[in-house]
Image: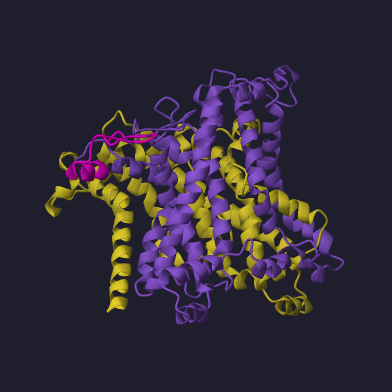
Chain colours: A yellow, B purple
Amino acid sequence: MRKRLTVTALYGSLTAASLVWMVPVVTALAISVLPIGQTRSGWWHGGLSQLTLANYRDAWSQGLSLYVAPSFVITLGSVLVSLLLGALASYAFARLEFRFKRLAYFLLLTTMIVPVQIILIPLLPWLRLLGLAQGDLQYLGIILVHTAFGAGWAVFMMSAFFADVPEELLEAARLDGASHLGQLRYVVLPLALPGLVSFAIIDFVFVWNDLLLGLTLLDRDHQPLTVGLANLQSPHLAQENLVSAGSIMVVLPPLLLFIALNRFYVRGLFAGGVKG
Amino acid sequence: MTTSLKKPPRASGPGSFGDRRGGGRARTVSGGTRTAGKTGGRTGYAFVTPLMAVFALFYLWPVLQSVMSSFFTWGLLRPWNLFDRSTWQFAGLANYRHTLSDPDFWHAGANSLLWLVLFPLLVVGISLVVAVAIWHARRWSVVFRTVFVLPMTISLAAAGVIWSFVYNPDAHIGVLNAVLKALHLQGTLDVGPLHLKTTGQWLADPGTLNLGFYDIRLVNVFVIIAAAWAFAGYGVITFSAGLASLPQELVDSARVDGCRPLQVVRHVIVPHLRQPMRIVFVVSVIFALRTFDIVYVMTSGGPGTDSTVLGLLPWQEAFAFLTSPQAGQGAAVAVLMSAVLIALGFPYLKSMLPRKESR
């Protein structure tokens, strides 16, 4: 009897906590699909007949649409470049010996603790000097900055996965005459694929969610959705309908990715630490 | 949605500090000794060069520039440039002296200190309780865990916006105010040094906590709560992984010995989670000091400078007022911040390096 009471209390409090935990998201979601008039008279009174997508349409046509393409270009570009350069380097860190290896590894890892503010201020003049601060080249600039600042995380994660590939398989490939590039391409990458997927998801979420770099380095025509949302948000303009629709639009891509590939995301975070 | 945490892919769980994973990690960097043939060295360079080039150009060099330019007076309209002497307006230590004597810096520092204390406590506390409860629950654990991990994927900018709805002063929009209104709890609350205004202005003027020599602005607390909501999932994942490796026999034998559930938690589960707790704590500390996004979106550091944090200062000084030549000063703040973070995070960093003796 007593045990059953404990179990009921456990499930009861977990359910209550889960409901409370969802309140912020539910609030934003509800406001985004209700007419603003309904929202202002207590959105929880709203009936299902009131549901509308007008807020999304308005948020989209009032400027948010401009931020969508940049978000995808920056995020997918950064993930691809990080995967490519990161995999090459991680192979060397996991499998090869060379001078200054420990020093290089240490320097890469510092990106996991220092704040991004340490590179922020001189970055804009520097990108201008390199010719990466104008037009679509801005994308290349910010992609390389994301790659550099995410390099520690990339190498840390991917080299851990690469190190788990059994040495015997590489040995066999070497006997068949495979070069190091061949061993990476045909042995390590296929076997470490789950690890690569984990890294790609975490990097996607991280880059997609960046606000500071996008806000600082890019002009208005190239800024990502997070910046668009921050621009919409203003306490003086009462436009809860647009802001809520915008927030759901920003949240959706990483959320869908998380739902689809949850296992890989969680496994990636096991690899230790997280970028914040 | 499936979270298969009962069988973590890496049996030892979250082990960046872990002794158990030490061996694996060591192999990561020094494993090359086995393959270090004649080709090792050159091939190694060829493989790391592309990444290291990007890293040097877009991280190392900007870091150096930040450090060097913090000794000069400059603004973004006329940026300091190492190779152009005409941009050198040497300031010596003036930027640092000015920063350290600037009340705004110390105010932001005090707010960051509050973040540094409260944020990790909230994250570790909430996620520990949740993870242990979920571990006890077994059934539905996947659903419960997903609920708590989900906010982790939400950008902090969006999390800030979403929480601004919860805190909305209009009791028809803001749930918090609606609940307080329904319970007739709106007013002011004075308990000793605590002066809390529950009148609904959570992000403007929710009151202060008087420490005698300093008034803590409670607006920070409400931003920190939102950030902890977004980040607690990391703790839940990490603790769940730790609990997955907890031998059931240990729990059972404690029960047989007459331990009550809370005693099991205290004497068996919490000691087992010491290592994950350290990781979550350190990562939250790092996160707390870097904070920019969520403060920028929720309050922009306001009202006045009530919720300004250190992470906001470099940006404000360099970019918010482009015409004022304060970039050097912003760089000085960034350098000071990084120094604190490196000091705090160094043990963590070292624990992620491969062991020396295994070379």
Q: Residue at x 58, y 37 (%)?
A: A117
Query: Residue A134's spot in the image, x, y percent?
Result: 55, 33
Q: Residue at x 55, y 38 (%)?
A: A138
Please state the extent of the stretch shown in magenta in the rendering.
B174-201
Q: Tag count in the figure?
A: 0
Query: Residue B171's spot in the image, x, y percent?
Result: 21, 39
A125, A118: nearer the viewer? A118
Instruction: Name which quarter of the figure residue A132 lies in.
Output: top right
The magenta stretch spans residue B302? no
Is A191 drawn above or below residue A138 in the view shown? below
Is A34 drawn above or below residue A234 in the view shown? below
Query: Residue B319's spot in the image, x, y percent?
Result: 53, 27
Residue B312 as seen in the image, left or right of residue B330: left
Residue B28 as seen in the image, left or right of residue B2: right
Q: Residue at x 65, y 34 (%)?
A: B335
Q: Is residue A264 visible?
A: no
For the C terminus of chain B, give its image quadrant. bottom right
Q: Residue furthest right?
A: B38
The magenta stretch spans residue B178? yes
B71, A1: nearer the viewer? A1
Query: Residue A119's spot in the image, x, y percent?
Result: 62, 37
For the N terminus of chain B, give its image quadrant. bottom left
B259, B342: nearer the viewer? B259
